[in-house]
Image (tube, rainbow, N blue to C red):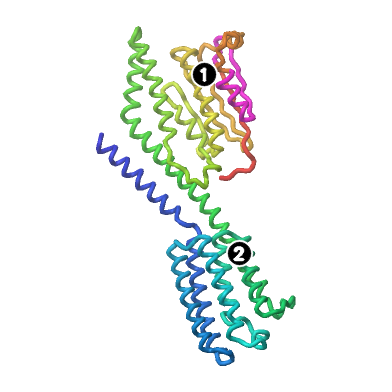
Amino acid sequence: MNAAFGTRESAVETRRRRIADDESDPVGPLWNAAQVFRLLSVLYALGFQIAINGDLLHPATTWALFGGLVSSSVLFAVAYLVGFGRNWYWIVTELVVTCALLMSTWLVASDEWVTNNQTWPTTLWATNVVISAAILAGPVAGGVFAVISGGTSLFVKGTVSFNFGRNATLIVLLAVGVVVGLAAVSARRSHRALVVAMRLTAATEERERLSREVHDSVLQVLALIAKRGREIGGSTAELATLASEQERTLRQLLAATEIDLPAEVVAADRADLGALIRAHAAERVSVSAPPDSVIVDATVAAEIDAAVTNVLDNVVKHAGEQARAFVLVENLGEQVVVSIRDDGVGIPEGRLAQAQRQGRLGVAQSIVKRIESLGGTAVLDSGPGIGTEWELTVPLQVDRRM
């Protein structure tokens, strides 16, 4: 048994590590691609520097500044590739360095040269900070940094031209910032959906594996005790009832076996209602649910499952020793319907009203009010000798996130 549990723990940890690996920065590939663009922009800046250096007032100073451009580019590339620089401190620092180098054009070039040319670091190189901001925080940040970077270039030139056919620097920077930002947002959204799907799959696999292991040992023993106890009768019947209750409780615990969802998805927590209801299956409880997952809000699933639990408890307590229960789950798209029927003795007319007057509010609070709190309905149909049937109908959100 110890070896079996050791294997289980190893498998769980392996699955957790696999999911943790997939929870790395979803925009990591964009950061990597951005550094390739950075390298190309530095090479272009080098070619531009060689071409125009002779036309500048202070060529030596320009080469010194170009050394700073290369050094800062290497530093930012390493920070973004490794990951420690993917935050606002580094992005703002890069913006300051970019604007400072753009404005250094005043120090090394004449007014005439500045008017007729782009800034000496080149606006292509200045695009790097726009890309970094867009990857970090999306299209709005990319657009804002594009305006700051492009605005600095226009400020250095001293003129603002709306002839975008001849000077489209600002338009290009804005386009890059918005497009890259949208790509980053889309990557993160897709990654969150993928992580949720992987975690639900891992939880389901682990629950099914545990169910198989426990079914082959504990559940079979409890089922055997319940069966033999009812056959023997007398005081042993109480032991059979206890064994049956523990079997059902254990199945519910197995159904609840899952792994934690990431913090980003807590607000969008989902659960498989079909899996929760199937866990109620027992010797005298038959469950029929759709083969596909019935994904609903986790709170809704928990409340419906609790109501079903109360109904099945009432079957055990009041329907008769040999009564069987039949549970049906239906996913109708806009709503989910759970029907619980038993072939027991039924509920005499007026019995529920009498129980409520006596202060016994199990049915009213644990079943009816619970479903009504979800905006649904709980309909009871019963009578002496015809068993009892509950139909629980709960509307689902139209805006589904899975």
Residue for point 46% across, 76% down? 71
Seen in the picture, residue 30 relative to 287 is either above or below; the reply is: below
Q: Which one is closest to the eye, mark 1 or mark 2?
A: 2
Residue 377: in magenta span: yes
Q: Nearer the viewer, residue 166 or 383?
A: 166
Residue for point 53% across, 55% down? 188
Q: Nearer the viewer, residue 145 or 207?
A: 145
Q: Which mark is residue 342?
A: 1
Q: Which mark is residue 325?
A: none
Q: Residue furthest front?
A: 107
Q: Quadrant of the C terminus?
A: top right
Seen in the picture, residue 291 relative to 162 is either above or below; the reply is: above
- The part of the chain drawn in magenta is 364-387
Cα separation between marks 1 and 2: 62 Å
Q: Quadrant of the N terminus?
A: top left
Where on the picture, by quarter, is residue 268?
A: top right
Task: Give the residue at mark 2.
Answer: 142
Residue for point 56% across, 73% down? 98
Residue 232 in view in this figure: yes
Where on the picture, by quarter, is residue 386?
A: top right
Asked whether the beta carbons under mark 1 and mark 2 sit within 8 Å of each other, the answer is: no
Report whether 5 appears left or right of 348: left
Q: Secondary structure at mark 1?
A: strand
**Disc 2 residue crowd, few under 14, some 14–19, many 20+, Cα 10 Å:** many
Report whether 253 appears left or right of 134: left
Residue for point 44% across, 33% down? 256
